[in-house]
Image: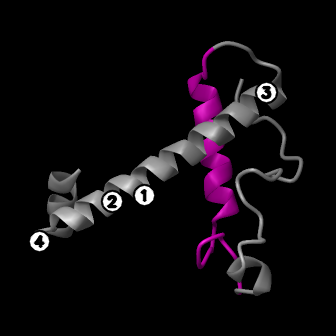
Amino acid sequence: MKKLANSVLTQSVTANVGTVICGFSKVFTGEIIELALQIQKSWGDEGPLLPDHLREAWRRYKVERQGAVGFRGAVGGGQAAATGGGVGLGDSIGGGVGRLFR
């Protein structure tokens, strides 16, 4: 991960920064997987996650954070986002958005 950060930033990254990047990557991956599992359950599918579940999770993740500023994706700030009370991945996302794949 440190090599990737070095090449993307075109400068040297310390070991501590590499560790932080790895941590954020792990959290991001976990959020996408959790959302994909929720989607799988809502679609009534069983078994392993399918690429369709992951694509839909990524699509919803992007939609939720479109124009986002800050930790929870608050548009325009606000107390809910500052205190962590905004919409998160565990909440219902998409507001009834129908299935796009399959």
Distance, label 4 to label 2, CA atoms, is 15 Å
What residue type is disc 1 on? Phe
What residue type is disc 3 on? Lys
Label 1 belongs to which residue? 24
What label sits on residue 21 in the rendered view?
2
Residue 64 picture location, percent across and down: 69, 61
What residue type is disc 4 on? Gln
Q: Earlier in the sequence, mark 1 or mark 3?
A: 1
Residue 94 picture location, percent across and down: 80, 52
Label 3 belongs to which residue? 41
Q: Residues within 10 Å of mark 2 (few under 14, many from 20)?
A: some
Q: Is residue 86 left or right of residue 10?
A: right
In the rendered view of the protein, which quadrant contains the C terminus?
Answer: top right
Residue 100 falls in image quadrant = top right
| Badge 1 element | helix
Please state which of residues 17 and 55 is positioned toward the viewer in this rendering.
Answer: 17
| Badge 4 element | loop
